[in-house]
Each structure stands twice: as structure tokens, then as C-alpha cells.
Image (cartoon, helix red, strand yellow):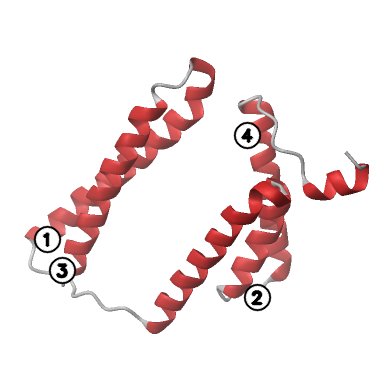
């Protein structure tokens, strides 16, 4: 199978799904529709661009055949497993705590060995999540398990 064939298929399927997400986000109330609409619009646009570029390379004879390196499959499965774990534990542990754990652990498992940058990235990402929900969306995140244990509430 040619790589461009797979890329075109994935990009167009993703564009359809993100288009459905965009349609759904447009039905939100005005205040809560801003961020999901912007994100889904950008995602749909980027997927369409990717699909068009892949389709264009299909028309040209220079498309490579699809080859998987063993390390790529392992990294994909590692990222998939850590993402599923993160989604499963986030409601119980709290979103900021989960991201503080998820970014360094998944990065380490993927082979990044600069711990200082993994922790810095985790802190910045958790802060970004907090700011988006508290400042932009004006929606509180669920309480963190660690804070509930410390405060007793």
C-alpha cells in the first residue's frame, strides 16, 4: 500500500469526524461555543490540507510504499496505552495532577531522557489547562484528589 493512499484516507476520515464535531460545537451556547468551535475549525482545516496534499501526491508517481519501523509501532502503542490510562484516571485523580504525571511518564516511556524538560513541560501544560478552564471558559475543573485529601473536603 502506498503511504499517500493511507494518508489520504486517514485525513479525509478525520476531516469528516472533525466536521461533525464542528457542527456539534456550533450548537453550544454562545459563551461555551467559542473554544470548541475554534479548535474544531482549525482541526478540520488542517486535516483537509493534509488530505489534499496526500491526494496530490497520489496523482504523482513518486509516492513511497508504506513501511513501519519496529520502534514506531512500539511508541504508538505506548502513547495509546498511556492516553487511555490518563483518560481513565483523570476524573478520579484530577486533571492537573493527571497531566503532571502523564507528560513526564509518557515522555520517559517514549524515550525522552531530559527529565528537567519533561517536568517543565508538564507544569506548563497543567497551568495552561487551568488557565483555559478558569480564565477563558470561566468553568471550574473538578477538585483534585490531592487537595481533597489535604483539606478533608
Q: Check disc 2 and report its element: helix, strand or loop.
A: loop
Point out the tag, 1 or 2, that comes first from the N-terminus.
1
| Direction from residue 92 to residue 69 in the image, left or right | left
| First reached walking from the N terminus: tag 3 or tag 4 | 3
Q: Is residue 117 left or right of residue 13?
A: right
Name the residue nearer the viewer: 139 or 43: 139
Q: Which residue is mark 4?
A: 132
Distance Cα–Cα, label 1 vs label 2: 38 Å
Identify the secondary structure beneath mark 3. loop
Dot 3 or dot 2, earlier in sequence: 3
**Disc 3 vs disc 2: Cβ atoms closer than 8 Å?**
no
Res 113 label: 2
Disc 4 crowd, CA 10 A, few/some/many (<14, 14-19, 20+): some
First in sequence: mark 1 or mark 4? 1
Label 2 environment density (alpha carbons within 10 Å; few <14, some 14–19, many ≥20): few
**Residue 23 bears which disc, if any?**
none
**Label 1 to label 3, Cα distance in Å?**
6 Å
Mark positioned earlier in the residue sequence (2 or 4) = 2
Packing grade of label 1 (10 A; few <14, some 14-19, many >=20) is some
Q: Is residue 91 above or below residue 83?
A: above
Q: CA distance from mark 1 to mark 4?
A: 40 Å
Residue at horizontal 26 percent and vertical 52 percent from the top: 11
Residue at position x 69%, y 38% in the image: 130
At horizontal 40% and vertical 21% (from top left) the residue drawn is 27
Query: Marks 2 and 4, how far apart in space?
Result: 29 Å
According to the image, label 1 marks what residue?
58
Q: Which quadrant of the view contains residue 106?
A: bottom right
Mark 3 — residue?
A: 63
Amino acid at each position: 500500500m502506498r503511504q499517500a493512499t493511507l494518508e489520504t484516507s486517514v485525513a479525509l476520515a478525520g476531516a469528516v469526524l472533525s466536521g461533525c464535531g464542528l457542527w456539534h460545537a456550533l450548537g453550544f451556547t454562545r459563551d461555551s461555543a467559542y473554544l470548541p468551535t475554534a479548535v474544531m475549525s482549525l482541526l478540520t482545516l488542517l486535516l483537509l490540507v493534509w488530505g489534499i496534499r496526500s491526494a496530490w501526491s497520489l496523482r504523482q508517481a513518486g509516492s513511497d510504499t508504506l513501511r513501519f519501523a519496529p520502534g514506531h509501532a512500539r511508541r504508538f502503542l505506548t502513547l495509546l496505552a498511556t492516553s487511555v490510562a490518563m483518560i481513565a484516571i483523570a476524573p478520579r485523580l484530577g486533571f492537573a495532577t493527571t497531566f503532571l504525571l502523564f507528560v513526564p511518564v509518557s515522555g520517559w516511556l517514549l524515550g525522552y531522557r531530559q527529565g528537567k524538560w519533561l517536568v517543565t513541560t508538564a507544569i506548563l501544560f497543567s497551568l495552561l489547562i487551568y488557565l483555559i478552564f478558569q480564565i477563558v471558559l470561566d468553568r471550574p475543573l473538578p477538585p483534585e484528589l490531592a487537595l481533597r485529601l489535604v483539606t478533608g473536603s
